[in-house]
Amino acid sequence: MKKRINSGRWSGIITGVLLIVGLITGIFSVVPVIDGVDYLAKASASENQVLIGSFFQLLMVVAYVGVPILLYPNLSQHHKGLALGSVAFGITAGVFIIIGVIILLLLLTLSHEFSKVGAENIAYFQTLGRLLREGRDLVNHVATTLAFVLAMFLFNWVFYKSKIVPRWLSVTGLIGSVLSILASLFFMIRVIDLDETYMILNIPIAVQQLVLAIWLILKGFNRAAQHPNK
């Protein structure tokens, strides 16, 4: 029993650490030069910024895939189907992150080629760059976000039903997940842009993710509710 409790405690700590890693890597994966107006001309000159952003974006895969996998043993005791769904969405988010990194590196390559061409080819590069950047935004802010937030919604729902974390924490996670899903959908249909409204809708889930991480690191799961059939 002691070994099982220690194992569950470490699982909570590592999950909490990965949640924080996901937030930190998300911040450092931002590449301002790609989001700027003159990205075709400036990206090649700021290659290190693009490569660093790509590196941190790849680190996000560890967090996005690792969190639902680490939670699976605890969640599956309460609802195996939802736990498995959370893992599936987490893996899907990881795949989309990798696709986003590939597009980012393609934009860097395009910028290098752009610096070599004459004025007569600018329109072609601008069109291709616009398509790649639009694709990257859709992959990062729609596909990836929806996949991971759906994973969070599922495991917060199991949290709510099982009470292995306080219900106020799971309820805020459910509300934050819904708001983040709405932000991605509104961006996809162009009701909003990547602006203040988009950020405001995503703040609740980010705050809940941080609080949940700290809770799991400091207190872990509710042991009384962790093994309902024991």
Image (cartoon, rainbow, N blue to C red):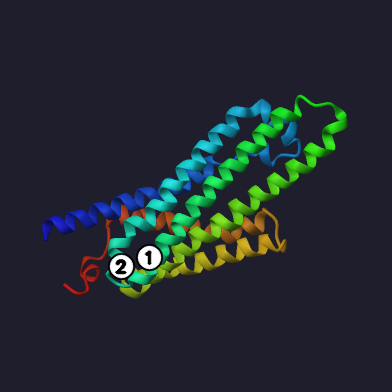
User: Residue at position x 27%, y 58% from top?
Assistant: 220
| Residue nearest the observer in this picture, 116 or 137 | 116
Q: Which amino acid does the dot numbered 1 rest on? A: Leu
| Residue nearest the observer in this picture, 80 or 166 | 80
Residue 74, image quadrant: bottom left
Label 2: element kind: loop
Q: In the rendered image, is residue 5 in sight?
A: yes
User: Residue at position x 51%, y 42% from top?
Assistant: 57
Residue 106, image quadrant: top right
39 w.r.t. 12: above or below:
above
* Picture coordinates of residue 46, whole percent (x, y): 64, 28
Label 1: element kind: helix
* Picture coordinates of residue 21, whole percent (x, y): 42, 45
Quarter of the image with the C terminus is bottom left
Q: In the rendered image, is residue 218 in sight?
A: no
| Residue nearest the observer in this picture, 103 or 33 | 103
* Picture coordinates of residue 138, whole percent (x, y): 64, 54
| Residue nearest the observer in this picture, 7 or 224 | 7
Q: Are marks 2 and 1 in contact (CB under 8 Å)?
A: yes
Please give the residue where the numbered disc 1 appears in the rendered image: 84
* Picture coordinates of residue 95, whole percent (x, y): 50, 51
Q: Which amino acid does the dot numbered 2 rest on? A: Ser
How many residues crowd around disc 1 within 10 Å: few (fewer than 14), some, or many (20 or more)?
many
CA distance for labels 2 and 1: 8 Å
Please give the residue where the numbered disc 2 appears in the rendered image: 76
Q: How many marks?
A: 2
Instruction: Identify the disc placed on residue 184.
Output: none
Q: Disc 2 or 1, which lies upstream in sequence?
A: 2
91 w.r.t. 164: above or below:
above
